[in-house]
Image (tube, rainbow, N blue to C red):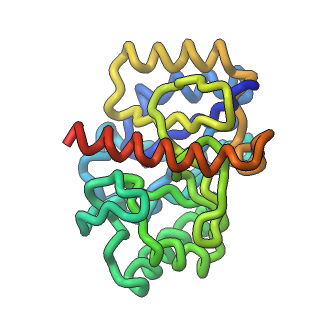
Amino acid sequence: MTTRYLIRFDDVVPTMAWSRFRVFDEIADELSLPYLIGVVPECRDPKLMVESARSDFWAWARARRKAGWTIAQHGYQHLYETEGRGLLGIGRKSEFAGLPYEVQFEKLSRGKVILQNEDVWEDVFMAPSHSFDTETLRALRDLNFTAITDGFGFYPYELCGLIAVPQLVARPLGFGIGVETICIHVNTMSDDAIKRIIDFIRTHHKQIISFREAKEVIPAFPPIPSLLRSATSTALRLRRAVRG
């Protein structure tokens, strides 16, 4: 058995650390890699304002979509309003969880319109801080989203009418099964961490797949995914609890 890898970048905005992302962009060109990127439609989070705004951001995003990348709607403004841990129970704050359906729907709708106007919207959602609730998922369904990049285990599964492609790790573990979504935040990565990921990508690029391909990965033995979801859910929540 061979692990398939999905490379995911969070917090993709005009003012992110493009000087640190450049090496990932270049190797994607070199090896034709299909990244998954979470684009904040209207970023208002000062923590994501790291470098001068990229003036051609939306043109760049359109080009990357045409190159086979998947663009996920990463919330709306990336501003946290609640301390809701959401369905997964691993985040400590949320832009959505705990808010009324109508409020969540309005935020998601406004974000969708922005991405549609820039011709980069796709039916994939990436929740800031991994925090969303059943009302978030209901609003997503009503807005014609079909998938989220979050969840437990190593195989895609149905969650309240959406396809959940699990995301558990920030560095590759190589369990030898299913899909590992590697979550990368370039704004806060050290030079050594970037080098390690680049070295990994170069070595394992043939195992890197697109989000569309990840949605289709199925297990050889049907009972395995539910067991893995239960085990990883327990392990991750315990780890978060111990870390405070």
Tell me where residue 64 appears, x and y as whole percent. Answer: 66, 42
Tell me where residue 151 appears, x and y as whole percent. Answer: 52, 52
Q: State the residue in front, 242 or 162.
A: 242
- Quadrant location of the N terminus? top right
Relative to 234, 226 lies left or right: right
Q: What residue is drawn where x is 37% and y is 16%?
A: 191
**Residue 176 seen anywhere in this rendered image of the structure:** yes
Q: State the residue in front, 217 or 56.
A: 217
Q: What residue is drawn where x is 55% and y is 48%?
A: 229
Tell me where residue 30 appears, x and y as whole percent. Answer: 70, 20
Residue 236 location, quadrant: top left
Q: What residue is drawn where x is 36% and y is 83%?
A: 100
Residue 147 location, quadrant: bottom right
- Is residue 65 shown above or below 186? below
Q: What residue is drawn where x is 77% and y is 49%?
A: 216
Relative to 132, 57 lies left or right: right
Tell me where residue 226 appears, x and y as whole percent. Answer: 62, 51
